[in-house]
Amino acid sequence: MGKKYQKAIVLLSGGMDSLVSAAIAKEEVQELYFLHCNYGQLTEEREQKSFEAICQYYQPEESKICHWDWFKEIGGSALTDSSLSVPRQEPSRDIPITYVPFRNANLLCAAVSWAEVIGAEAIYIGAVEEDSSGYPDCREVFFRAFQKVIETGTKNEFLIQIITPVLHLSKKQIVQKGMELGAPFELSWSCYADNEEACGECESCRLRLKAFAEAGLKDPIVYKMNKR
């Protein structure tokens, strides 16, 4: 079966959801381009390490790392603001303090700019709406609206589509899909709080551990709590 796209950019944080999105893109795209953004997050160093390892694994045509400072300057998120703490508790239904204001819009803007330059027809982003943290910029309605922004704000020499391959999957299903595609989960990083060993207590760690448990699998990364 032929590929769906000739060129596509994958927004790759180094986390589980973006890893599986990259694995899906590998099946659907002829030429892959990986884009990562450092924005002053607590685990910036570890996320970049995961990004680089995943690049080594999938060998994209090209990879880029953007270095941004305005999210840290703006603050308002426990991931970027030193005056706030990452919660180490069960996920709630409220929008958590780890939400980085309008981050996905910024990520998509960078990807669209690059897509216009290289002629990429698609941008893959690993947002999850169904079983995630309730971030407003991870909803289908947001991506539909942003698709209109692309259509009205670019040269329109070719269609650039936003692809959200895991948007309506549960975290368990994401793990299962990744295993099916041979995604290297051991290279990924989801912890919001620590750079050396995953804390196992923040919301992102809890969601990840729950997903692997529900899938009947062992998460291959090391957690601090496993050493206690």
Image: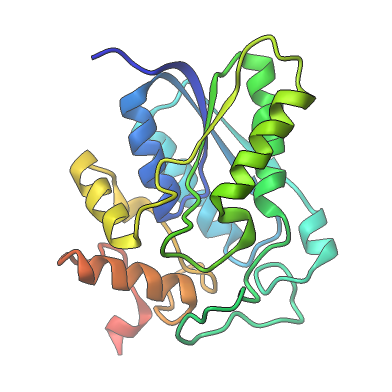
The percent position of residue 95, horizontal first and vertical second, equals 62, 73
At 61% from the left and 13% from the top, the residue drawn is 119
Residue at the outermost left position:
216
Residue 197, can we see it? no
Q: Nearer the viewer, residue 213 or 55?
A: 213
At 67% from the left and 74% from the top, the residue drawn is 78
Q: Is residue 128 above or below residue 30?
A: below
Could you tell me which quadrant the N terminus lies in?
top left
Question: By what rule are the colours in the image chosen?
Answer: rainbow
Q: Which quadrant of the structure image shows residue 54? A: top left
Q: Nearer the viewer, residue 208 or 145?
A: 145
The percent position of residue 24, horizontal first and vertical second, equals 34, 35
At 56% from the left and 54% from the top, the residue drawn is 139
Could you tell me which quadrant the C terminus lies in?
bottom left
The percent position of residue 143, horizontal first and vertical second, equals 60, 43
Residue 139, can we see it? yes
Residue at the outermost bottom position:
228
